[in-house]
Image (spheres, helix red, strand yellow):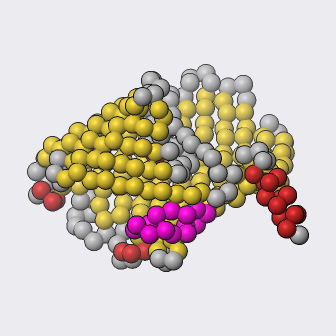
């Protein structure tokens, strides 16, 4: 029995990144429907951290996340560290695509459950992250027009703390390059503040023409249920993000921003945030 368990573990670790449990492809009337259920091994996996979260189709996880930042608003130097051990995840995807010589439409549904161990409030915690996303993409090959709509719903459940965070977002990207202009609506709920709700609207214009740097121009409106007025603050900002030593996981941010908030009686204030980031 022990030998069988050992063989199973060895075969699992040496298998491909995805272990397919079920796969089906169906084609009717120029429409292709693909369904796949699989286990994704996230034992060793890293990605280019240069892109901000609102440009990622699915939220990415890091094994190591460290940050040192200084903000002229708080006039404090702050540090943060997050360590995670990510276990293999269960995923199910369904892709429905229809294309002609002039245009194409793609609808993607994804459901995913990822277990992990991480530091939460400076204590080891078992975390379960369910995630669902729906993405609709449209392209017109004649006019070069395109648009993308992405809905994401995910949460982090922490044990033994018995707390959770729920995040919902809806983003629109158009017209010619999906990474150029985007509009994002998001809502965050914390179990530690059950009577409160955090929400924001954001417009972002990005420049990703260079591999090692990113420029983001943005305007965000935010508020929370416990504070009046409904929109508590307005923020206009520019972020310059650059990789260091040609490493995708090491970069620094330089973000000057103009803040109009009830905290300052809606008097415009100019601040600056500078940070050094390690996401691996």
| Residue 217, percent from left and from top | 33, 35
Q: Which of the 4 image quarters holds residue 96?
A: top right
Q: Which segment is the magenta one?
A: 115-128
Q: How many marks?
A: 0
146, above or below 257, in the image = above
Against 263, residue 220 (above or below) is: above
Membership of 121 in magenta stretch: yes
Q: Nearer the viewer, residue 17 or 111?
A: 17
Residue 140 in the image: state x and y as whole percent.
61, 28
Residue drawn 82% across the image and 61% down it: 6
Q: Say left or right for 149 vs 259.
A: right
Residue 35 in view: no
On the rendered image, what quadrant is the N terminus found in? Answer: bottom right
Residue at 32% x, 33% y: name it.
Answer: 240
Q: Main secondary structure of the magenta part?
A: strand
Left or right, residue 111 beside residue 69:
right
Residue depicted at x 30% and y 43%: 275
**Residue 58's x, y, as percent?**
56, 48
Percent of width and height locating residue 46: 56, 42
Q: Residue at x 42, y 44 (%)?
A: 278
Q: Which residue is at the front of the view, 32 or 256? A: 256
Q: Nearer the viewer, residue 53 or 235?
A: 53
**Residue 224 appearing in the image:** yes
| Towards the viewer: 211 or 202 | 211
Q: Is residue 247 rendered magenta in the image?
A: no
Q: In the displayed orientation, state which residue is furthest to the front.
A: 3
* For residue 221, side relative to residue 55 (left or right): left
């Amino acid at each position: 029995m022990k030998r069988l368990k050992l063989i199973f573990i060895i075969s699992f670790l040496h298998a491909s990144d995805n272990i397919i449990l079920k796969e089906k492809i169906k084609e009717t009337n120029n429409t292709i429907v693909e369904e796949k259920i699989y286990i994704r091994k996230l034992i060793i996996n890293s990605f280019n951290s240069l892109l901000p979260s609102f440009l990622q189709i699915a939220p990415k996880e890091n094994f190591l996340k460290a940050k040192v930042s200084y903000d002229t608003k708080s006039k404090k130097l702050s540090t943060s560290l997050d360590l995670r051990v990510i276990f293999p995840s269960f995923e199910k995807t369904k892709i429905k695509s229809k294309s002609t010589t002039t245009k194409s439409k793609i609808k993607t549904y994804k459901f995913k459950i990822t277990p992990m161990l991480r530091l939460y409030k400076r204590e080891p915690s078992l975390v379960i992250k369910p995630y669902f996303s729906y993405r609709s993409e449209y392209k017109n090959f004649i006019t070069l027009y395109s648009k993308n709509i992405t809905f994401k719903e995910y949460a982090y459940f922490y044990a033994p703390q018995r707390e959770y965070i729920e995040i919902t977002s809806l983003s629109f990207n158009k017209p010619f390059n999906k990474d150029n202009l985007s509009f994002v609506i998001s809502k965050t709920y914390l179990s530690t503040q059950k009577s409160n709700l955090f929400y924001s609207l954001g417009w972002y214009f990005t420049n990703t023409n260079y591999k090692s740097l990113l420029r983001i121009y943005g305007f965000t409106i935010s508020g929370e249920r416990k504070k009046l007025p409904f929109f508590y603050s307005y923020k206009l900002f520019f972020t310059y993000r650059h990789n260091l030593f040609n490493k995708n996981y090491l970069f620094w941010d330089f973000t000057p921003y103009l803040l109009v908030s009830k905290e300052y009686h809606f008097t415009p204030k100019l601040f600056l945030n500078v940070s050094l980031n390690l996401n691996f």
